[in-house]
């Protein structure tokens, strides 16, 4: 699943968070601020999307930086 952020520094921070907290496989996307995220395990598409959305929400709350914009593709 592709995740896009408006800030490349935030993308690196989110990648580290996802790797550490939910064991995600995270690679840099085609452009700055873009990540390709896969979750390990037996997830259907909707379950994976829900787990990723929840993890990103937790990351956003922990960072307390509302100006960071996150989009899912």
Image (cartoon, rainbow, N blue to C red):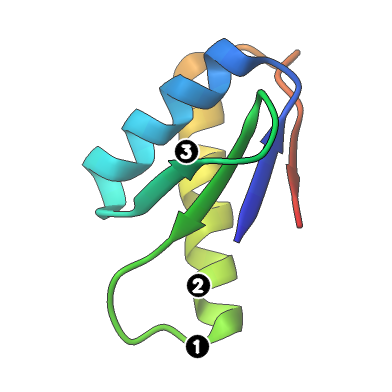
The mark closer to the camera, 3 or 1, is 1
Residue that appears at 55% across and 25% down: 11
Q: Nearer the viewer, residue 60 or 37?
A: 37
Q: Which residue is mark 3?
A: 58
For the question of whether residue 64 can be seen, the reply is: no
Residue that appears at 44% across and 44% down: 27
Q: Residue 29's image quarter?
A: top right
Q: Residues within 10 Å of mark 2 (few under 14, many from 20)?
A: some
Q: Which residue is mark 2?
A: 48
For the question of whether residue 57 can be seen, the reply is: yes
Relative to 14, 17 lies left or right? left
Q: Residues within 10 Å of mark 1 (few under 14, many from 20)?
A: few
Residue that appears at 76% across and 57% down: 73
Query: Hey, which residue is sitting farthest front in the picture?
Result: 30
Query: Is 39 placed above or below 37 here?
Result: below
Sequence-wise, which precedes: disc 3 or disc 1? 1
The secondary element bearing badge 1 is classed as loop
In the rendered image, residue 45, in percent from the top left (x then y), is placed at 58, 82
Q: Are discs 1 and 2 less than 8 Å apart at CB?
A: yes
Relative to 36, 62 lies left or right? left
The secondary element bearing badge 3 is classed as helix
Q: Which residue is mark 1?
A: 44
Tell me the number on the disc at residue 67: none
Query: Is 66 placed above or below 5 here?
Result: above
The mark closer to the camera, 2 or 3, is 2
Sequence-wise, which precedes: disc 2 or disc 3? 2
The span from disc 1 to disc 2 (Cα, nearest Å) is 6 Å
Query: Is 61 placed above or below 38 here?
Result: above
The span from disc 2 to disc 3 (Cα, nearest Å) is 15 Å
Q: Residue 39's image quarter?
A: bottom left
Q: How many marks?
A: 3
In the rendered image, residue 43, in percent from the top left (x then y), is placed at 41, 83
């Amino acid at each position: 699943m592709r995740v896009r952020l408006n800030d490349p520094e935030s993308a690196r921070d989110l990648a580290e968070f996802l790797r550490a907290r939910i064991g995600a496989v995270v690679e840099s996307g085609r452009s700055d601020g873009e990540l390709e995220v896969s979750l390990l395990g037996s997830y259907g598409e909707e379950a994976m999307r829900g787990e990723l959305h929840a993890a990103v929400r937790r990351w956003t709350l922990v960072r307390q930086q509302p100006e960071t914009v996150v989009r899912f593709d």
